[in-house]
Image: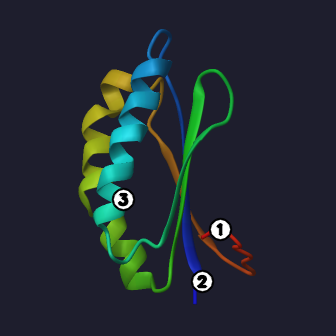
Amino acid sequence: MIKHALFARFEAKPGKAADVAAFLELALALANQESTTPIWFALQLSDNVFGVFDAFETEAGRQAHLQGPIAQALMAKAEELFSSPPSIEKIEVLGLKNQAI
């Protein structure tokens, strides 16, 4: 059962929004390779603000994701793409409905 999640929020530097969107599209391929990350969303919250929501069955899965290739790539690009360091919040899932197949 999905119980653990993360929400990352980051603001693109001026002129870098398209680069952030492209980065997130590439990150989807990495997310698809993570067996402990069953739910992963890349989000555009406004013109320059982006986010990632992902959820996990276990705390170990969440920790693996935080130390995995997406997090490493995100931090490696942070200075180039973002106006400030990404905000990453650990959150707990209280309920879940998913009708997507």
Q: Residues within 10 Å of mark 3 (few under 14, many from 20)?
A: many
Which numbered disc, 1 or 3, marks the residue that appears first in the sequence?
3
In this orientation, does residue 45 appear? yes
Q: Residues within 10 Å of mark 1 (few under 14, many from 20)?
A: few
Q: Residues within 10 Å of mark 2 (few under 14, many from 20)?
A: some
Give x and y (percent) for residue 60.
Answer: 37, 83
Identify the secondary structure beneath mark 3.
helix
Q: Against 14, is 82 above or below?
A: below
Report whether 11 appears left or right of 24. right
Alpha carbon separation for disc pair 3 and 2? 18 Å
Find disc 2 in the rendering and name its residue: 3
Find disc 1 in the rendering and name its residue: 100
Report the front residue among 43 and 9.
43
Q: Identify residue type, mark 1.
A: Ala
Q: Against 78, is 2 above or below?
A: below
Q: Which mark is residue 31?
A: 3
Numbered disc in front, either 2 or 1: 1
Quadrant location of residue 90? Answer: bottom right
In this orientation, does residue 8 appear? no
Give x and y (percent) for residue 45.
Answer: 67, 35
Q: Identify residue type, mark 3.
A: Ala
Give x and y (percent) for residue 24.
Answer: 42, 39
Quadrant location of residue 82? Answer: top left
Identify the secondary structure beneath mark 2.
loop
Q: Against 14, is 24 above or below?
A: below
Q: Are marks 2 and 1 in contact (CB under 8 Å)?
A: no
Which numbered disc, 3 or 2, marks the residue that appears first in the sequence?
2
**Which image quarter is the C terminus in?**
bottom right
